[in-house]
Image: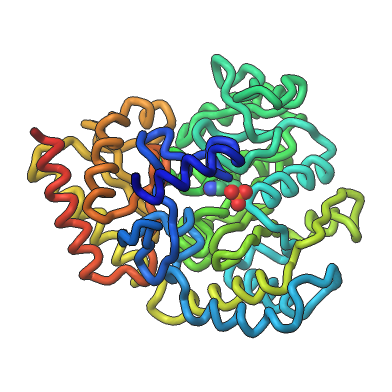
Amino acid sequence: MSNSTALFNRAQQVIPGGVNSPVRAFKGVGGTPVFIQKAAGAYITDTDGKQYIDYVGSWGPMVLGHNHPAIIDAVLQAVPNGLSFGAPTEGEITLAELVCKLIPSIELVRMVSSGTEATMSAIRLARGYTQRDKIIKFEGCYHGHSDSLLVKAGSGALTLGQPSGPGVPADFAKHTLTCTYNDLDSVKRVFEQYPDEIACLIVEPVAGNMNCIPPKAGFLQGLRDLCTQYGTVFIIDEVMTGFRVALGGAQSYYGVTPDLTCLGKIIGGGMPVGAFGGKREIMEYIAPTGPVYQAGTLSGNPIAMAAGLACLTELSKAGNEEKLAAQTKKLATGLKALADKHSVPLCVQYVGGMFGLFFTEQQEVNNFQQVMQCDAAKFNKFFHLMLEQGVYLAPSAFEAGFMSLAHSDKDIDRTLDAADKAFAALAK
Ligand code: PMP
């Protein structure tokens, strides 16, 4: 029995499903999750000593690669001063200043400890600020696991949302209206039906939780314009895309200005950090300046701030943004060429440092319904063929892949060699 299998068996005795976040359980792709011992640069090593080229990067934060010396040094320097004070520190200001500089639509920013907290708090703020209850989200977009956001579409865009599972009251879910990604008309119809009731619209500017779906030209600006027209707070959830699609986030890449932005992952460099920020006038509505309550014992934690600051400082260095995008392109175009060579139908989509593989004849995948038409079983086979050869992809057909600055040309070539064999096996 492998060490991972033994650990998974042991974990299931005391942890629900053996994992602390569901997608880690390999439920979608099947098999036993590999338990990780350590990581460095582009590689993770499991408890059986097998090394993998890692395209998950802790689901996004490890944009510099694992164990980057700048982050480790910053953490080690911060630790002797104390792990948490529950009182303000200079590190919080320095990180906030850098975030506001990199993403100019953010005038004020509040630190939290996860992406879920960031989106949940931004939505509460938008509801408090507008004194409206309803929100709009998109089918297939994930914004963390708070009640308002664990909602699936009704039978059509104009029906009220339903809980996507037990535990979310129907009375709560009905305030969440779900539209179709990349379909502005579906959004217009909802605004026309509820012109004075929509507090905010939240969107992933590149959808990364139904694989990788870039916005069509004009989609994000169309959302911006509709929000302005109806007095709705426009929230861009950059938890995944922030500092990855571009240093200034997807909002700078696509040239669109939200009212509020949610951040997570890279902002903490691997430590638990999230943030939400935006227009001063809206942000001042939050406690202690305003009436909307939001708080956190470990918010702005000094070790996490040090890690985040080191990560963003390093990432901001000249050439890094371009390098991340170039490596992603090299991998994405290489995979597409190999799939074509073996006549395996594959659509590859990528932006900045994120990418997605769709096993489908479709030339483009633009929304959740089209994602559902892809061959998830084929992805699962591909995943295991790559895993066997030492390439760790996201263990789900519905998650984006993440490039890091530590991935060398050699790593990408090795990945493509493995993919060549995997596609050959799939073509049989
Ligand atoms: N928003 C987006 C776009 C995400 O991708 C995620 C997590 N993958 C979240 C919010 C929630 O973040 P967290 O897991 O840190 O709570």
Residue at (38% x, 36% y) in the render: 366
Q: Please state if 242 lies on the left or on the right of 149 as rendered.
A: left
Q: Is residue 216 visible?
A: no
Residue at (46% x, 62% y) in the render: 244
- State how many labels appear: 0
Q: Position of residue 164 (x, y in %)?
A: 60, 25
Q: Residue furthest top?
A: 155
Q: Is residue 6 visible?
A: yes
**In which quadrant of the rendered view does residue 271 lie?**
bottom right
Q: Position of residue 362 (x, y in %)?
A: 25, 32
What scheme was used to colour the molecule? rainbow
Image quarter of the C terminus:
top left
Q: Please state if 320 lies on the left or on the right of 106 as rendered.
A: left
Q: Position of residue 272 (x, y in %)?
A: 63, 60
Compared with residue 78, is residue 253 higher up or lower down, i.e. above or below?
Answer: above
Q: Position of residue 28 (x, y in %)?
A: 40, 33
Q: Please state if 146 lies on the left or on the right of 206 as rendered.
A: right
Compared with residue 409, is residue 284 higher up or lower down, i.e. above or below?
Answer: above
Image quarter of the N terminus:
top left
Compared with residue 84, is residue 202 higher up or lower down, i.e. above or below?
Answer: above
Residue at (35% x, 59% y) in the render: 54
Q: Please state if 374 lies on the left or on the right of 261 as rendered.
A: left
**In which quadrant of the rendered view does residue 178 lie?**
top right
Compared with residue 272, is residue 156 higher up or lower down, i.e. above or below?
Answer: above
Question: For this rendering, which residue is in front, 244 or 216?
Answer: 244
Question: For this rendering, which residue is in front, 82 or 346?
Answer: 82
Residue at (39% x, 66% y) in the render: 404
Question: For this rendering, which residue is in front, 249 or 48?
Answer: 48
